[in-house]
Amino acid sequence: MTVKDAVVDRVRSLCQERGIKANELANISGVTPSTVYSLLNENRRDVSINTIKKLCDGLEISLGEFFSASEFNSLEQEIK
């Protein structure tokens, strides 16, 4: 699993836990829906930490809480 995959899994999991959709996440986070859909798009590689922070703010969690999920514990080496 890559960092991008882990971020996408975490965002989807948080949305599912809260019963919200991508549009709702965008609205409560102050980002455009296209930003959230772009983040969730598997073909897009890079994710901005600033975007993740805004999503965390909207979800009322810290970056530490976001990244404390098990998805981030066994990531693949990014440098090859």
Image (cartoon, rainbow, N blue to C red):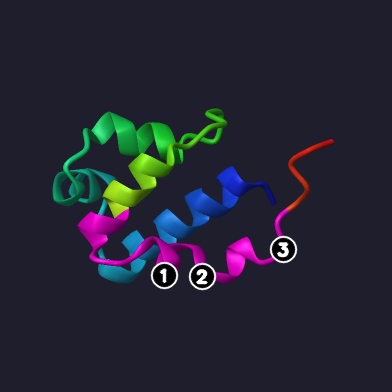
State the extent of the magenta-drawn residues as a range: 56-75
- For this rendering, which residue is in front, 12 or 64? 64
x 42%, y 43%: residue = 49
- Identified at 25% across, 61% down, the residue is 59
Q: Which residue is mark 3?
A: 74
Question: Mark 1 and mark 3: span between their CA atoms?
Answer: 17 Å
User: Label 3: how many residues lie within 10 Å, few (<14), some (14-19) or many (20+)?
Assistant: few
**Are circles 2 and 3 on residues that touch, CB within 8 Å?**
no
Principal secondary structure, stretch drawn in magenta: helix
Q: Position of residue 55 (x, y in %)?
A: 29, 51
Q: Nearer the viewer, residue 69 or 15?
A: 69
Amino acid under disc 1:
Glu
Find numbered disc 2 in the image and state the secondary structure of the residue it sits on: loop
Residue 37 within the magenta-colored segment of the rendering: no
Of mark 2 and mark 3, the one earlier in the sequence is 2
Mark 2 and mark 1: Cα distance apart in space: 5 Å
Q: Position of residue 69 (x, y in %)?
A: 52, 69
Dots 2, 1 in contact, CB < 8 A? yes
Q: Secondary structure at mark 1?
A: helix
Could you tell me which quadrant the C terminus lies in?
Answer: top right
Residue ID for mark 1:
65
The residue under the point 47% across, 34% down is: 41
Quadrant in the picture for residue 71: bottom right
Neighbours of disc 1 within 10 Å: few (<14), some (14-19), many (20+): few
